[in-house]
Image (cartoon, rainbow, N blue to C red):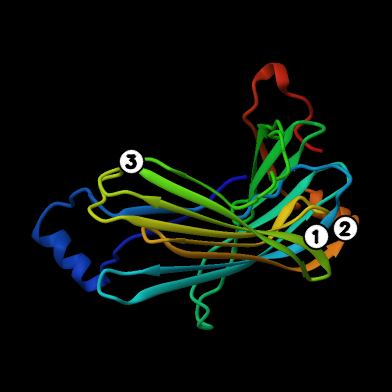
Amino acid sequence: MRPLSIVLAFALSAPSLLIAQLAEPQRPLDGGTREILVSILIPSIPNAPFSAIVNTEWIRPLSDGSSVTLRNHRAIARDRAGRIFQERRLLVPEDGRHESVVTKIEISDPVSHKLYICVPSERVCQLEFFNAPAFAAPAGSNKSGSNASTNSSSREDLGPQTIFGLETEGTLEEQLIAPGVIGNDQPLKLISEYWYSPQLGVNLISKRQDPRFGTQNFVLSDIVVGEPDSKHFLLPSNTRVIDLRDPADRTNSHP
């Protein structure tokens, strides 16, 4: 599963850019920040088909006490063979002025070992070799903990809960990073809460609080258990395929 990237940059207005070009030669735009938000994991499990919407919320605190909140809502599906379809959309403010457009479409097939990464705006799909990672259901989460001179962690079983008609098992994890471990001058407390569906093999709700990156909330909604529409696993029309697999692995570029 590919992460969704957000590139933060400063833009100059047209007049000021023109003045800068006349006054001095253009210079490299050094600095800036590239941040990556890793979304909820959808494993390639056979015989557990479903479709849903992944609702993402990222609340990032700023040094002046304010915060930035970005969201998106993207479609996902998995069929009985374990093929996975995922949209990737821009994270945007929900202010009615920004459109969360589809930036990528990913289709992974654990049977044919193909991964298509399509960019609709360019009508191009990149084909790579795909080998589904081994999947193991979460282990029991009875309350436990470990302490060391640098870190401490704990895990607590929150018990069962029915969410959107599906039985889930809740887990609360806390980790304390001691000062100096990653260059921090104060202790850092990380909190994660998961509500896992054994039937689907995914977390229906995932919440992460990390002072370095803010609060990340993922919630699956509009869940339909059963075989999804086969159209999800077709490449967009009029698409050019670029095959990046090793020559020995190559077959027909189109499914």
Mark 2 and mark 3: span between their CA atoms?
53 Å
Which residue is under mark 2?
Answer: 229
Sequence-wise, the earlier of marks 2 and 3 is 3
- Measured as percent of width and height from the top left, residue 72 is found at 58, 68
Labelled disc at residue 51: 1
Label 3: element kind: loop
Which numbered mark, 2 or 3, is in the foreground of this view?
3
Front-most of 69 and 126?
Answer: 69
Q: Residue furthest bottom?
A: 96
Mark 1 residue type = Ser
Instruction: Kindly state the secondary structure of the residue where label 1 is placed.
Output: strand
Name the element at disc 2.
Answer: loop
Q: What amino acid is at disc 2?
A: Asp
Q: Quick one: 116 or 188, which is closer to the camera?
A: 188
Q: On screen, 133 above or below 237?
A: above
Q: Nearer the viewer, residue 39 or 201?
A: 201
x and y percentages locating residue 67 in the rendered image? 37, 74
Location of the C terminus (image quadrant):
top right
User: Within 10 Å of the Cα at label 2, are there few (<14), some (14-19), or many (20+) other Cα atoms?
Assistant: few
Do callouts 1 and 2 mark residues in contact (Cβ within 8 Å)? yes
Residue 99, located in which quarter of the rendered image?
bottom right
Would you name the residue on which mark 3 appears?
A: 149
Horizontal placement of 85 versus 229: left or right? left
Q: CA distance from mark 1 to mark 2?
A: 9 Å
Q: Earlier in the sequence, mark 1 or mark 2?
A: 1
Left or right: 246, with 17 as reference point: right
